[in-house]
Image (cartoon, coloured by chain):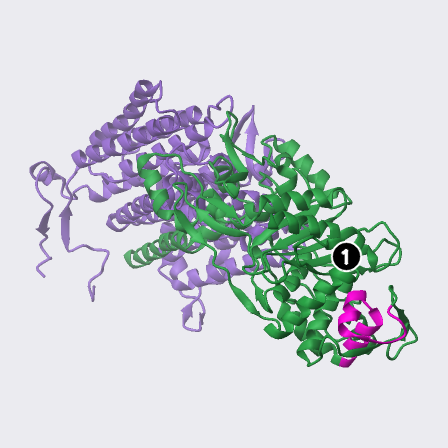
Chain colours: A purple, B green
Amino acid sequence: MGAFDPEVPSVVVVHRKRRNVELAMVVFALLIGLAAYSLVPLNQTGRLPANLPVVATVWFGLGVAAHLVIRFRLPYADPLLLPCVLLLNGLGLTMIHRIDIINDPPTSGATSQLLWTALGVGLLVGTALLLRDHRPLIRFTYSLGLVGLALLLLPLVPVIGTEEFGARIWIRIAGFSFQPAEVAKVVLAIAFSSYLVEKRDVLALAGARVLGLDLPRARDLGPILIVWVTSLAILVFQRDLGTSLLFFGLFVVMLYVATERPGWAVLGAVLFAAGAGFAVWGASRISQLSHVGVRIESWLHPFADIDQNGQIVSAQFGLAWGGLLGTGLGLGRPGLTPLARSDFIAAAIGEELGMAGLMAVIVVYALVVARGLRASLASKDQFGKLLAMALSFVLALQVFIIIGGVTRLLPLTGLTTPFMSQGGSSMIANWVIIALLLVISHQARKPAATRLENALEDEETQVIQTAGGAR
Amino acid sequence: MNRPIRRVAVLCLVLFGLLLGNGTYLIVVRQDSLNAHAANRRVRDAEFSQDRGAILVGNTPIADTEPTDGRFGYQRVYPEPERYAHVTGWYSYDRARSGLEESYNTELAGTDDSLFARRLVDLVTGRTPEGASVVTTIDPAAQRAAEEALGNRKGAVVALDPRTGAVLATVSHPSYDPNRIASHDIEAANDAYAELAEDPDNPLTNRGVREIYPPGSTFKLVTAAAALEAGREPDSEVDTPAELTLPGTQTTLGNDTDCGDGRVSLDRALQLSCNTAFANLGTELGADALREQAERFGFGTRHLPDLNGAASTFPEDPDPAQTALSAIGQFEVAASPLQMAMVAGAIANDGVVMDPYLVSQVRAPNLSTLRETEPRELGRAMSAENAEQLQQMMVNVVEQGTGTNAQISGVEVGGKTGTAQSDLDRNPYAWFVSAAPVDDPQVAVAVFIEEADIPRNDIAGGRLAAPIAREVTQAVLQ
């Protein structure tokens, strides 16, 4: 880059819309989902599912509707995001249905999950229709921040907060349970982004210089400390390692990107290490932290107590039983692993589609993240950059934490697998993330010189030299 | 802001890379051990639903599978359950496996590497995979004779072919019905297992191979072999006082038979099983010579791993009194009936110890032989010349000593009785080991009776155990 400011492009790149590519990929992804759904009964009984026409209609209707809305409202949006997400969503639905029919009588998890998917797609449509541009969101910094923190802490409120599987991360109102952290993830990413864009110059002011690192000023530490304390509160009082790790990791990375100061990243890592160290130290001493010790023990030595660690052990057995190519859809025993349809859906995928299938799923996630980060790099405004980066990173981190936990790379912490795990809050939150990424990528790829838009619409990507860009 | 975003992209790449790397590690390094884990229900259920191979005696299955309509498709069946329980072991859903069902599990289940090509063919042609069958060395007549002769007594019989080491019979009483543990009614199977496991008579224990007991006077064969190897002759005389004060103690040792109160030949001492003579001999030879001789017969090593055989022991560092007691098979000397059959067999086989084996062949479902056991020498326990002398001494035991009950008309049988008391409050153990015919050995037998319900004297082995050895020997020779 040399002396040139990297923020000011010397050329204007006009992207192709590539909507037809998206349509082809969407149809491909929808077909894979439908084929997977048909394979389950085909493998088990040799017959196609009786409701195949209905399912195919609903499923293609959803996918094509989403595509059409993007085509007309966000024509420059990234063409890969929607097909990737539909692929993941379809596999998730199939796997939930496949686990449904283990039960006698079959449960209806897949039906409600399909409704949640429809709601997610509805939110995508709504976002595309109402919020064609992400920039207005910058106005709601503090209200969104408060809402996000409140959502995070909501499960601690008596009466509506409920504890399940040892973690207090659900709220239950009128028989309807909800995991507010998933929504808080999106709300806080927006709030952090606008806050940091507003304050980045102040935060980037060098404080003391220690060991070659520019540390922030003490009074700028306020927000990071609030987030740190909130994360610890989640860890201690909600017993939710995953969410705590997710939010803190997200905030530290956003601080680093906003200020471009590694000092923040180092400080964040130190604070995280201190928090984690405290949790491990406290595991055997403080009853509120005993769950941390259990998690670490069942990570390091799951086979020492198979009854207690039955879930992670069963997931390992499932992955080994599936081997490289898997047992085939409908032919494995994913039902042996408790929570196979939610936290452990990655193990079910690995068992029936094989490690090769699970790796393909991981790569699809990586593609989504890569396209999100691309939108971030291409975005022309700092808020868009930061928000797209944050949303992509939080997806990556969440996938890493949960799939890493299921495959015993990390201690297991309860998080949902985006677009796959059963659960409404997670489904709609992640669809909103994709909606926002689509909006940002549309804004980023939309030609700045709008008057040329029509002329260049259907041509190859053009490089148009600006007046000063003679190099 | 683009530079930190690129770094975040690299971080994401690392995170995804770690996930993929860990997945690779799981499949490449950990898959096999996870699939072999006993708690792995997926593997267990799949195996339980398989057309498992048969375990055969001759061409008759002693463990087989039959198709059923139930949940698993195939039921394991043991046609002669009690007689062969300690050979086949059991095959259960919740209670693992034992015996050949355990040691040949991969072959029987068809998952062994030797069946790989066949599995591929099955996969392509859609044929139901079948396991290999395992052919044992058991002689059905000998097994029946051993079972019937042992009757209701607690104890064990092991018969070997001394020339090859092939196990011709192995019976342990009380026995059990493995069909009950193999039941598809998992609860009933678990109850049956629990009942057997808690039974004070330990029916699940293979007394012939898995347990070691004081061998009593049958160990005098080892002491005699050591003496011959040290240069003694059958007619060398040994001091045999009526009462011997054990060196360095006030404890006295007597004889259970009339060995006089003076000197006796080695040959005569074995015939009458004179305790004081062999105790003196042990003191003269020393613990090291005795241990070395015992180890040359196979003590200190586990034999018959197919049935998870136990190693017989000779004490580590006995004092002189303990050495004297060890020489007559007391103190901490302990041997499995299998080991004692090996001792008799090695003497009959002119001093060469053969490695005992129970499985002669593994056959693929199309009857082609996948594996065949070749008889294997473990080593030489004594010179052929000394072995022949000891054979004659054993013949004398049966013809004119304590072992007359083992006589078979027209066959030269060599044997040795034994009675061992590990605990004064309980009945003694009765032993008899034999080999026949001496000039062309075809069978070596060890009989062990856990509770000989007669007062302790050296005849116990001769009276109770010798007839059983005779029945088994006759069954083999006919």
Give x and y (percent) for residue A106. Answer: 48, 23
Q: Name the secondary structure under disc 1.
A: helix
- Numbered marks: total: 1
Residue A284 drawn above or below residue A107:
below
Compared to residue B221, the image places residue B83 above or below, namely: above
Q: Is residue B351 above or below residue A374?
A: below
Tell me which residue sits at (76%, 60%) in the image: B417
* Neighbourhood count class around disc 1 (C-alpha, 10 Å): few under 14, some 14–19, many 20 upward: many
Give whichever of A99, A287 is nearer the camera: A99
What residue do we see at 61% from left, 53% from top?
A: A293
The answer to whether any part of residue B85 appears in the image is no
- The reply to whether residue B199 is visible in this rendering is yes
Q: Which residues are magenta?
A: B259-284
Rendered image quadrant of residue A203: bottom left
Tell me where residue B231 appears, x and y as whole percent. Answer: 68, 81
According to the picture, the residue beneath numbered tag 1 turns out to be B404
Q: Is residue B269 magenta?
A: yes
